[in-house]
Image: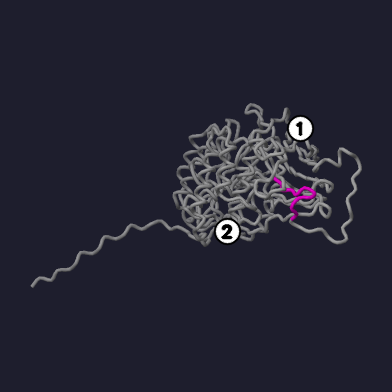
């Protein structure tokens, strides 16, 4: 009798390891309404990061709403370029564009849009770039949307550099090492070959990698140029200095030596946004999240000049609201960029940078005197008496303080918020202002709807479609699709992270 055995099943292919549920974001309470008679001045540092928008898009691509802490309204709004008038010279590198129009989500309230455009440095006159690519090659980066996308992204950035620019490469996994000493960007084939050979595996000695990258940047420091470390990682530092405050202090000290830090985040499931934001904000650099090759092209090709070359540093905005015309105000977003009132005139206080040709947009929701209040009056509040007919009609006054890249002394630009920029109907407001309002409303809905009033996703779609305008890169059309995706995903439980 012959005994027959069932054939052994074919072994299943081993899938690469994938982290799930470990994305880390810092939860910050949204800015509340402030009573103008009690606190008339609002001060914040400019922020033109875009990581929140890209991460939201990556979440919705999986039919999952982002966790509320991942949604930062100012980064959603500033993902898009806006058509503000350009400044005429690098010596006064900003123009200011103000518009006031009815709030689309609460009747009787208004939005104040403050738009800024930076001077665009011509390619022939831009400063030399001394760059160090700091690349995470740890095991957590071994996924298609991580290290392979890093390689493609940095290759794109390399193509934007001039022959006089310099590139070095530091990698880190279980330990850190120099993969490429400072090399002229004209030797693109040599640099690209080093990038192509990179592989992932091991722990994440990120802090040691940062130290080595800064050391290389300082060895090749160009006092007249741009000296920058560009960190590409999912943020999973687990060897060496992992304390966020220690890393923050180190990056701040290096910033004082003239070397800045920008951060490119990759991947989901293990993304440490909290650390990435801390490093970029204290390193005088931008934080971007690269979820697709298209996003890499936007950040590192189409917007390469603004990503790499600052036209002004320590840029702060201060708005003083007029208690005779405005009862309350609320800044939409910028929660992690708020400054004390006295910080505005203190040149020792660090603030954000603005790159070549960048636009920056901020929105306030205001309650005119007599409008629907969010906060009641105090019993013993003093009545407001204003002197001067012109001042009494203004809604407020905008001040922008900035330093030129190689200066330690700030300059000031001021603009009144008066009746000449006040539009009676939402539909009559500038197209860019209406589009920014639709993005702000979307962010409010994703955050939970505390301040979104009567607006829903269909209202956001209506506003955005009516204000798309010239959309040569398709960013605004994509936004419309994101709103539709959020509408269909809104009934799902948010992914536990």
Q: Is residue 215 visible?
A: no
Q: Secondary structure at mark 1?
A: loop
Residue 17 is situated, as x and y percent measured from the top left of the image, at 43, 58
Measured in 3D between alpha carbons, the distance from the residue under mark 2 to the one under mark 1, in whole angstroms, is 39 Å
Which residue is more in the foreground, 165 or 79?
A: 79
Up-down: is 6 above or below 142?
below
Which residue is more in the foreground, 84 or 444?
A: 444
Q: Is residue 132 left or right of residue 1?
A: right
Q: Which residue is mark 1?
A: 92
Residue 263 is situated, as x and y percent measured from the top left of the image, at 60, 47
Q: Is residue 227 visible?
A: yes
Q: Which residue is mark 2?
A: 24
Is 370 contained in the magenta span? Answer: yes
**Which mark, by number, is residue 314?**
none
Residue 259: quadrant of the picture? top right
The magenta-colored residue range is 363-373
Residue 50 is situated, as x and y percent measured from the top left of the image, at 60, 45
CB atoms at circles 2 and 1 under 8 Å apart?
no
Is 305 contained in the magenta span? Answer: no
Q: Is residue 461 left or right of residue 1?
A: right
Residue 354 is situated, as x and y percent measured from the top left of the image, at 68, 40
Which numbered disc, 2 or 1, marks the residue that appears first in the sequence?
2
């Amino acid at each position: 009798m012959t005994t027959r055995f069932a054939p052994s099943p074919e072994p299943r292919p081993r899938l690469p390891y994938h982290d799930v549920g470990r994305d880390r974001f810092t939860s910050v309470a949204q800015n509340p309404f402030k009573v103008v008679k009690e606190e008339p001045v609002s001060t914040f540092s400019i922020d033109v990061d875009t990581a929140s928008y890209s991460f939201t898009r990556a979440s919705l691509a999986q039919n999952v709403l982002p966790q509320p802490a991942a949604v930062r309204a100012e980064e959603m709004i500033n993902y898009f370029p806006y058509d503000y008038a350009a400044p005429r010279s690098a010596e006064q590198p900003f123009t200011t564009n103000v518009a006031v129009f009815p709030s689309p989500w609460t009747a009787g309230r208004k939005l104040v849009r403050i738009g800024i455009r930076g001077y665009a440095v011509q390619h022939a006159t831009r400063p030399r770039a001394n760059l160090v690519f700091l690349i995470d090659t740890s095991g957590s980066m071994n996924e298609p949307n991580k290290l392979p996308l890093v390689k493609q992204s940095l290759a794109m950035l390399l193509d934007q550099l001039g022959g006089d620019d310099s590139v070095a490469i530091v990698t880190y996994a279980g330990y850190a090492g120099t993969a490429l000493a400072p090399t002229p960007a004209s030797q693109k084939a040599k640099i690209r070959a080093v990038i192509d050979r990179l592989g992932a595996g091991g722990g994440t000695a990120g802090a040691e990698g940062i130290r080595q990258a800064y050391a290389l940047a300082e060895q090749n420091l160009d006092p007249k140029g741009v000296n920058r470390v560009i960190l590409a990682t999912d943020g999973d530092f687990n060897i060496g200095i992992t304390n966020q405050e220690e890393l923050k202090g180190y990056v701040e000290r290096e910033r004082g030596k003239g070397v800045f830090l920008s951060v490119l985040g990759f991947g989901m499931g293990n993304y440490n946004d909290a650390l990435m934001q801390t490093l970029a904000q204290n390193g005088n650099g931008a934080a971007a999240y690269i979820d697709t090759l298209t996003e890499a092209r936007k950040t590192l090709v189409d917007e390469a000049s603004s990503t790499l070359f600052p036209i002004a540093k320590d840029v702060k905005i201060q708005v003083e609201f007029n208690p005779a015309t405005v009862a309350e105000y609320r800044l939409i977003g910028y929660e992690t960029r708020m400054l004390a009132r006295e910080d505005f005139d203190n040149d020792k206080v660090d603030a954000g940078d603005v790159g070549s040709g960048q636009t920056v947009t901020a929105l306030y929701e205001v309650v005119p005197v007599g409008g629907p209040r969010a906060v009641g009056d105090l019993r013993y509040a003093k009545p407001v008496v204003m002197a001067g007919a012109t001042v009494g009609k203004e809604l407020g006054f905008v001040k922008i303080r900035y330093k030129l890249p190689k200066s330690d002394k700030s300059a000031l630009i001021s603009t009144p918020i008066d009746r000449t920029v006040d539009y009676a109907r939402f539909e009559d407001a500038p197209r860019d202002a209406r589009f920014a309002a639709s993005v702000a409303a979307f962010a409010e809905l994703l955050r939970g709807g505390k301040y979104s009033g009567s607006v829903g996703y269909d209202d956001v779609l209506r506003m955005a479609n009516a204000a798309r305008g010239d959309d040569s890169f398709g960013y605004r059309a994509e936004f419309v699709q994101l709103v539709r995706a959020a509408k269909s995903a809104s009934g799902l439980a948010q992914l536990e992270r």
